[in-house]
Image (cartoon, grey):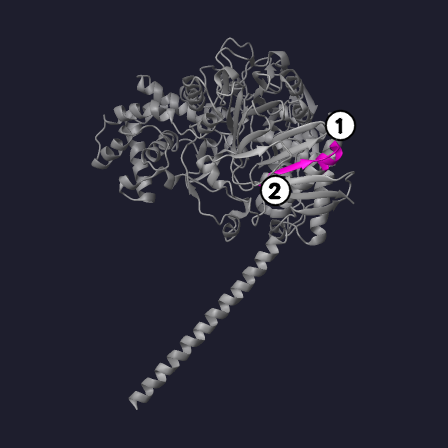
Amino acid sequence: MEAALKRQRVSRGKKAVKVIAVIVIALLAVGAILFGIANAYIAKSLPQIDGSIQVPGLQEKVTVTRDERGVPHISANNDHDLFLAQGYVTAQDRLFQMDLSRRQASGELSEIIGEKAVDRDKYFRTLGLRRAAKLSHEVYSQEAKDTLQWYADGVNSYITEAKEKGALPVEFTLLGYEPKEWTPLDSLTIGKYMAYDLGGHWEGQAFRYYLLSQFSKEKAYDLFPTDENAGPPIIASLGEGKVDIEKSFAKAVIPPEFNGSNNWVVSGEKSASGKPLLADDPHLSLATPAIWYQTHLRGPSVNVSGVIFAGIPGVILGHNESIAWGVTNTGPDVQDLYIEKRNPNEPNQFLYMDKWEDAQIIEEPIRVKGQETIPYKVTITRHGPIISEFAEESGKDTVFSLKWTALEPSKELEAVLNMNRANNWIEFEKALEDFHTPTQNFVFAAQDGTIAYKANGKIPIRKNGDALVPVPGWTDEYEWTGYVPYDQLPKTVNPKQGFISSANYKVTDDSYPYHISNIWAQPYRQMRIQQVLSEKEKLTVEDMQKLQMDQVNLQAQEFVPIFLEQVKKETLTDKEKEVLVLLAGWNFVDDKELAAPLVFNRWMQQVGTVLFQEQIPETMRSLFRGRGQVIDDLIRRAHAGKPGPWMEEKGGLSKVLHASLKNTITEIETAWGTNSQGWKWGDAHQASFVHPLSSVTGLNYLFNWAAPIPAGGSSVTVQAAGYNLKSGVINHGASWRFVVDTSDLTKAYHIVGPGQSGHVKSPWYDDQLPAWVEGTYHTTSLTESIENGHVLTLEPK
């Protein structure tokens, strides 16, 4: 009986196993089918890149050849077709990014995302980038207006086609909406957003106001970028009127402080080819898709190659057959916060020269997905929009307005179109007259041997004040009286040293008669670039590429000896001594395989935490512009025996360094274990290029399926690579790398991380991510001959 029961149990067990196996196989089959369906659905929106397509509005055929990296080479017989095709092709690759960009800049994200985006939309509606774009459109030439419209027509042709075929990018399906018609105003609004992204320093003014209102004069000035003391008289004159900075700007959208760049040019006398070399790598937020769209435009009046922001016609950075150019951010003080006094009896009036003036009130209703439209009003004084109340009332009778060059009409696209056609420095500098905002350090190289530099854009001249703190808006004492004259902007042509470089550091000496900025980038990138360019007699393209990937950390070279000397004054544990040995033997290269860069970069972060975390809330620390420079200076002064109050309150430099070292070791051991010999900078510092929808659980597997790649460099090396401390993901750095030798302007060398396409199924979606990490450049040609290219013919319909 027992044997029979045993046989039955075995038999039932085998049947159960078979049933489970069948279920598993069925589930796998269903999963495979669903995966296949989803895969096919997503792939349906891949753009057509071979054969021919009829495009409404074209006058003649246009050829679009995509090279091995997906860069479109667009050849047309007239400008109308060239820019229409550029709009169509860019939309093929980047439509969702374009739509998200215009919505973000216009304050229209809530319409597709919902309530979570309302505060962000309020902020951008308050700034008024779209209003500024509308004012700008009115002053453009007819040629530029036509170009914008032709580009928009091309984008709209693709939108219509994709809707008819049910082939919109999958992001639209996931968010449940379709893109509306593209307009010239959308392109100009994206351009204004880049002026916002490159900043103008109002945040620092607000932070210093906060310091003066919360701390003693001595403590406040200890964190000022200069010794000037414009603050107290202004703050004191407010009487009881105060603006609560923390409430006012807790929800402000603050662009990354380190948005900047490297660029340099080398004369023919210092190049192996005998002609000038140029290198440029703009540093911006890193994401998927890439912020830049690389393209080549060939028409009857232009043959230009380079990059542009997706959604804008032309090429903003690159080269043609005669010249090449690149930019870095100058970072001038082009924003002022004005302290406005409101009429207690009439909230839409503000005091000016002893009279109450009516403010302009603009209705900006915000549509919210799944909810009723939110009424929202923007109040604009003579100085600009009131920005301290977009989140909530925080000053009652006293508020901040923002005056900013980017809110004025400007014609940057006009400049871009003329730059694309320029053949020499005279023509190029003439084109720059229309490039007002953001102010940029342009470097230039020409086949005729000219190298040049110009800090170009509108830089305000102030009657009084130096842009350190907010200024009274009820008097004319602090008004702008004009702008630095165009012919007096910082400039140099063919300098004797044979090269020019800029890396967001101070662009003039103290003899320059106009104020430019209170805050400059830390000097380490500029110092390293000039060091390398000076050392070698004859430089090559390969030298330029190697320098763009340079990981030498001159900040560490300066501060590691100070850290080691100072911290040894304290009683150290064996573990702390062990970690210090790593630094003592370091070559000051932020190599991904080394432990020392991990220790040093985290230690520098912890110094700021020890000094400020207890007394300055996180929301205020986000406004602390120039924080890196200030911390560097606090350490230098303390080491020289002149500690300021922040350092003294923490017991002096040695104790601050010891406390921050302890925190650093705890932080590293928690994440990467106690074996310091196994620590690697690349474990905490990795490239990923995150897609905006990857924050939604599950979608990260669709849009960021590739594993992050360990990478070297840091925020202070020439190979710029700022990162998120919590995730370790590099989120800021060279959004594009570009090198060209003007001895042969038919080609140039590029890296666009992570790739050309915004479509997750495209072979060019993230194919340049490894190249970005390792410094592997691709060659892009101005000639018509492209091997193994995909050829698409756009035909009139």
Q: Toward the viewer: 772 or 688?
A: 772
Question: What residue appears at the point 60 percent right and 49 percent down from the top-left corner?
Answer: 171
How many residues crowd mark 1 within 10 Å: few (<14), some (14–19), many (20+)?
few
Structural distance between the alpha carbons of marks 2 and 1: 32 Å
Say if the magenta span includes residue 82: yes
Residue 644 point in image, percent of width and height: 36, 20
Residue 266 point in image, percent of width and height: 51, 19
Q: Secondary structure at mark 1?
A: helix
Residue 576 can be seen, yes or no: yes
Q: Which of the marked residues, 2 or 1, is nearer the chain's N terminus? A: 1
Residue 788 point in image, percent of width and height: 59, 42
Q: For the residue marked with disc 1, what is the amino acid?
A: Glu
Residue 556 point in image, percent of width and height: 35, 26
Residue 652 can be seen, yes or no: no
Q: For the residue marked with disc 2, what is the amino acid?
A: Gly
Tell me, yes or no, whether the two marked residues, 2 and 1, touch with CB atoms within 8 Å.
no
In this image, 606 relative to 329: left or right?
left
Q: If the image is split into quadrants, where does the C terminus sit? A: top right
* Residue linked to disc 1: 143
* Residue linked to disc 2: 789
Question: What residue appears at the point 58 percent right and 58 percent down from the top-left corner?
Answer: 38
The magenta span reads 70-84
Say if the magenta span includes residue 163: no
In this image, 353 relative to 502: left or right?
right
How many residues crowd mark 2 within 10 Å: few (<14), some (14–19), many (20+)?
some
**Residue 103: mark in rendering:** none
In this image, 792 relative to 336: left or right?
right
